Amino acid sequence: MSTIAVNVDSLERTLDGKGFFHSVAYDAYLTMPGWSFWLQCAVCIGLLGGAYWWRYRLFASGGGALQGKSPRLRSFVAIVGPALLVTGTLLACLLVLHLMGAERADVRVLAEVFLLTALVLGVRLASWFFRKVMRAHQILQFFVFLIEWALVLTAVLAFFGLFHPLKMAVQGIEFSVGNQVFKGMNIVGGVSMAVLALAVAGQLSEMVAWGLEKYQSREGIADNDALILTRLFTVTLFLVTVVGVLVGSGIEAATLSAFGAALGIGLGFGLQEVVLNFFSGVYLLFERAIKPGDYVTINGVFGRVDRLTSRAIVIRDGVGTESLIPNSFITKGVLQNHTLSNNDYRVSFKVALSDVARFDEATDLIVAVLRAHPRTLVDKPQTVFLTGVYADRAELEVSLWINDLHKGRQSLTSDLYRSIALALDTADIALASAP
């Protein structure tokens, strides 16, 4: 009895199709009984459609059965689930049929489709691992997606015998630009090399950034120094990768020099803002004028510096709104960094009395309230100043110092307003009506 296991020869034939009429699929159509061939094709199509319907139902209505599950599990089901289900079901069918005494030739369609789905499953598993488990760089996310679908498409084309004809058609493409001759396979190979090389470069850059972050937290290196090293390494790595890909694709040195000159002109005109923002960001890092975690005011926007990107500074305010301010705008304008040298920050707010004659008594009560609050820095002055006197009101400015601005200002002033109002009411000192 012959076995139905998929061997290496089958894999070589599948990946070396020389046209549809020389493919494994067409050969199976010729050699198998018609009813068996079409039945197995229907089973494979049904399994594929059923697998994607199953995935759709799992994620239907805002999450379905996977609602509340971990993002990693949800991504595994979305990316790998259908291929795993089809491959596992086909394997089970093949094992059952083998135990029932079926010959390999009798289940050829199922065996070849199993080989194809197993290959797709391996590609999907690798894609999920790089995109979700390793938390790949955004560039790598995109390039892994391209690599994944390129491999899947290649496997499907090869299964139907269309890969080799497509390859021969691409090899026949040839054209020249000046003295540089471009061939179809060189272009495809160069693009493939570029995608793979940039994907590796992106992940390597991410791993270096992660390593520098860990080293920085352990050794106490300044945030800006780690960011500078990360930026310089990333730019150098991508420049070397791009040049290496271009040279490896067969582009001559003279052509590459002309391309570099044209790129420089393009940067000078079309991308000058991008370049200006990048170098402005590097300048800010070297100057140590700002770092993640600082509280700043830029163009009327107050908030905490969430992160420094190559193009802009991201500031998150008290209500969670993120503002992206270009780096070049900061170097040209006024930057107010409230926590540049230390975390001490002055908080001030207004209070209005109905009788200025009781200002001294009210001042003592207000200062006592300020000093009693746990967030007040008692070694810094707590002050109450008259800022305006009118017939029916005396306006005061109350101020104190804190060093925990990350806890917010609104909750602090709310507590102080309430305590001051109660203290003044107890002393029978009236507050002024709203103007």
Image (tube, helix red, strand yellow):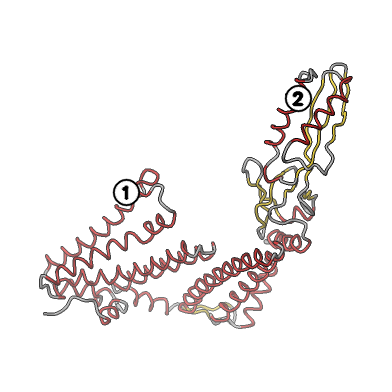
Q: Nearer the viewer, mark 1 or mark 2?
A: 2
Q: Is residue 357 left or right of residue 34?
A: right
Q: Position of residue 133 (x, y in %)?
A: 46, 63
Q: Is residue 382 above or below residue 211?
A: above
Task: Tell me where residue 224 appears, x and y as whole percent.
Answer: 71, 62
Q: Which residue is mark 2?
A: 423
Q: Amino acid at mark 1?
A: Arg
Q: Residue 307 in the image: x percent, y percent?
A: 65, 55
Looking at the image, which residue is at 68% across and 61% down? 271
> Please, is residue 22 above or below residue 432 in the view?
below
Per the image, the residue denoted by label 1 is: 57
Residue appearing at x 37%, y 43% in the figure = 61
142 up-or-down from 335: above or below: below
Rendered residue at 77%/18% (across/down): 433
Reading the chain from its start, which is encountered first: label 1 or label 2?
Answer: 1
Side of 135 where 93 appears, left or right: left
The crowd level at tag 2 (other Cα within 10 Å; few <14, some 14-19, many 20+) is some
User: In which quadrant will I find the C terminus?
Assistant: top right
| Residue closer to the observer: 159 or 58 | 58
